[in-house]
Image (cartoon, helix red, strand yellow):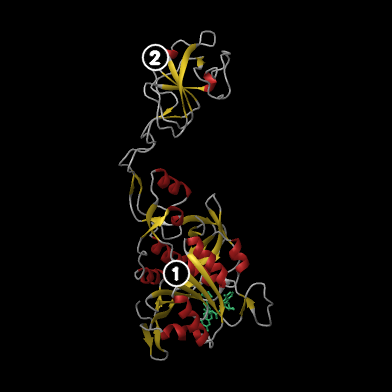
Amino acid sequence: MTGSTESSCCTEAEGPVPRMWTVDEHLADVLGHIAPLPSIELQLLDAQGCHLDEDVVAAGDLPPFDNSSMDGYAVRTADTAGATSQYPSVLTVVGDIAAGAGELPKIGPGQAARIMTGAPMPPGAEAVAPVEWTDGGTGSGRAADSMGAPVENEEVRVLRPVTEGAHIRRRGSDIAAGDQVLTTGTLLGPTQLGLLAAIGRGTVRVRPRPRVVVLSTGSELVQPGDPVGPGQISDSNSYTLTAAARDAGAIAYRVGGVPDDAAVLRAVLEDQLGRADLIVTSGGVSVGAYDVVKEVFESYGGVDFRRLRMQPGKPQGFGRIGDGVPLLALPGNPVSSYISFELFVRPVIRTMLGAPDIHRPVVQAVCGADLRSPAGRRQFLRGWYSPDGSVQAVGGEGSHLVGALARANCLITVPEDTTSVAAGSTVDVVLLTD
Ligand SMILES: Nc1nc2c(c(=O)[nH]1)N[C@H]1C(S)=C(S)[C@@H](COP(=O)(O)OP(=O)(O)OC[C@H]3O[C@@H](n4cnc5c(N)ncnc54)[C@H](O)[C@@H]3O)O[C@H]1N2
Ligand code: MOO
């Protein structure tokens, strides 16, 4: 952390003016202190939502053996040449092969074996005639619609020719031994976990999901569902931020409504430190008289408070507490804390996860109406981005407007040196969904 007390200029009348950080400087400072969590070996289902920390190579072929893709009869192709319904090939059934079969009959000329989907091809057979291409051993000479029970010394009539390799899934046709099937950084979802299981991996090396403690501060906060007294409000930030942390890939613990009382806040922090890879707080980072948050965090020694050239989200805190657990202290205004999360906390969580994509995607869009923005601040307006490439502002600039925030799917970015944007201009848009 670079000290926040550094001054950028001074005037004789006003004295030193605290330096203001750009969004990019703050983000670089934060990310400069964050590394991926050490990787661990996990059981497959425990690794869901984690990113790989190994290149996965298949030890064997997949499928591991030639097998049938249909229920039917394993045959020699020459035996079926010229077969028709009127003049079927009559073959002797010398075996019955279920999926998982170990011992296999050898198929000689004029012979066939009943075979089920997924069962290994017997030696001598070159193709599979689906049961619908045969009479199913009924002797009727009419096409069957299912396999009957096995009958000893059965004959089967094959009603059409079968070409070499028909209905056989060849060994290694999906994955060959030695193939690299997944690369470091890959997010493990259902299909990747299925692939790992298919190649016989019981465990996998991944970056664990960071454990994030989300803590909202403020004596005015009541928990949703509880009665709201005069001057009180429902604690929404701890829900927004906990959900956002989960959405980013973390395991998030919500600790709602810690009052503005230094002893209580310190006790809660000490209690939570043991289960946190990251602590995120909201509230108490501005200049209010009852902002004990700064006082408590500063007492740990490693937390800086600074002002950013952005709106919303001007006051921010960042540092380490306890045994070096990173802490981001976000402003209390609900829109400010959420946007701060998206810009600064989400990349921290995704860096810890070892994700290759740590930032929300940014696209260009055509602005649907005129916009205004304060000089010297990068503004993040709530917006609705349409697939046609246009964007509309949603609601106003106020950082208390949670109704509009919930209707937005993007943030319209207006640069620091721009005070107005004309309708039809191109703007950068941060998409809030993948
Ligand atoms: N004189 C100045 N006043 C303020 C400045 C400034 O520079 N000079 N900065 C403003 C800006 S910008 C912001 S953002 C806020 C940040 O204030 P705090 O981080 O100290 O936040 P609080 O005072 O605790 O709360 C602000 C606001 O948000 C509501 N809030 C807080 N926590 C929650 C929660 N968990 N759920 C819902 N709403 C919450 C709180 O009731 C306040 O209304 O400071 C400005 N002031
Ligand atoms: O800049 Mo504050 O974070 O919006 O209201």
Q: Position of residue 427 (x, y in %)?
A: 48, 59
Q: Is residue 389 above or below residue 308?
A: above
- Residue 146: image quadrant is top right
Q: Is residue 215 above or below residue 359?
A: below
Tag of residue 109? 2
Mark 1 — residue?
416
Q: Position of residue 254 (x, y in %)?
A: 54, 71
Disc 1 on helix, strand or loop?
loop
Residue type for callout 1? Glu
Q: Position of residue 411 (x, y in %)?
A: 52, 62
Indicate the quadrant containing the N terminus: top left, top right, bottom left or bottom right.
bottom left
Would residue 306 appear left or right of 85 to someone viewing this image? left
Disc 2 on helix, strand or loop?
loop
Packing grade of label 2 (10 A; few <14, some 14-19, many >=20) is some
- Residue 105: image quadrant is top left
Would residue 117 appear left or right of 145 to someone viewing this image? left
Residue placed at 53% from the left, 68% from the top? 241
